[in-house]
Image (cartoon, rainbow, N blue to C red):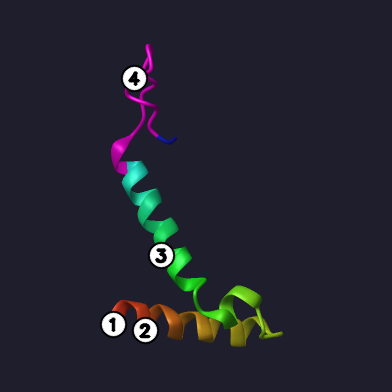
């Protein structure tokens, strides 16, 4: 759940740690989508797609 506006009269509780982890995962997926080959899914076979996904993830990790 996304945290509500602090000016709201009745605040809704949320898990801050789960929100941080969710945000981190979403940012990683967005960085992977910058690789055109992944975003448009050029590879027809799942094995080739997965291998390039692993290469892209390694490239992002090494930055």
Q: Which mark is residue 59?
A: 2
What residue span does the magenta drawing correspond to? 3-17
Q: Position of residue 8 (x, y in %)?
A: 38, 17
Q: Which mark is residue 33?
A: none
Q: Earlier in the sequence, mark 3 or mark 2?
A: 3
Query: Farthest residue in the top direction?
Result: 9
Q: Quadrant of residue 28?
A: bottom left
SS of the residue under disc 3: helix
Q: Which mark is residue 28?
A: 3
The answer to which of 52 and 47 lies nearer the viewer is: 52
Q: What's the distance in space between the residues labelled 3 and 2, CA to CA?
A: 12 Å
Q: Earlier in the sequence, mark 3 or mark 4?
A: 4
Q: What's the distance in space between the residues labelled 3 and 4, CA to CA?
A: 31 Å
Q: Are marks 1 and 2 in contact (CB under 8 Å)?
A: yes
Q: Which residue corresponds to mark 1? A: 62
The answer to which of 49 and 4 lies nearer the viewer is: 4
Q: Which residue corresponds to mark 4? A: 7
Question: Which is the main secondary structure of the residues drawn in magenta?
Answer: loop
At a point 39% along the width and 21% down the height, the residue shown is: 12
Query: Farthest residue in the right direction?
Result: 44
Residue 7 lies within the magenta run: yes
């Amino acid at each position: 759940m996304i945290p509500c506006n602090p000016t709201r009269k009745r605040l809704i509780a949320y898990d801050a740690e789960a929100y941080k982890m969710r945000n981190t995962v979403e940012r990683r997926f967005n960085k992977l989508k910058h690789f055109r080959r992944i975003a448009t899914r050029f590879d027809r076979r799942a094995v080739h797609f997965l291998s390039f996904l692993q290469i892209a993830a390694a490239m992002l990790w090494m930055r």
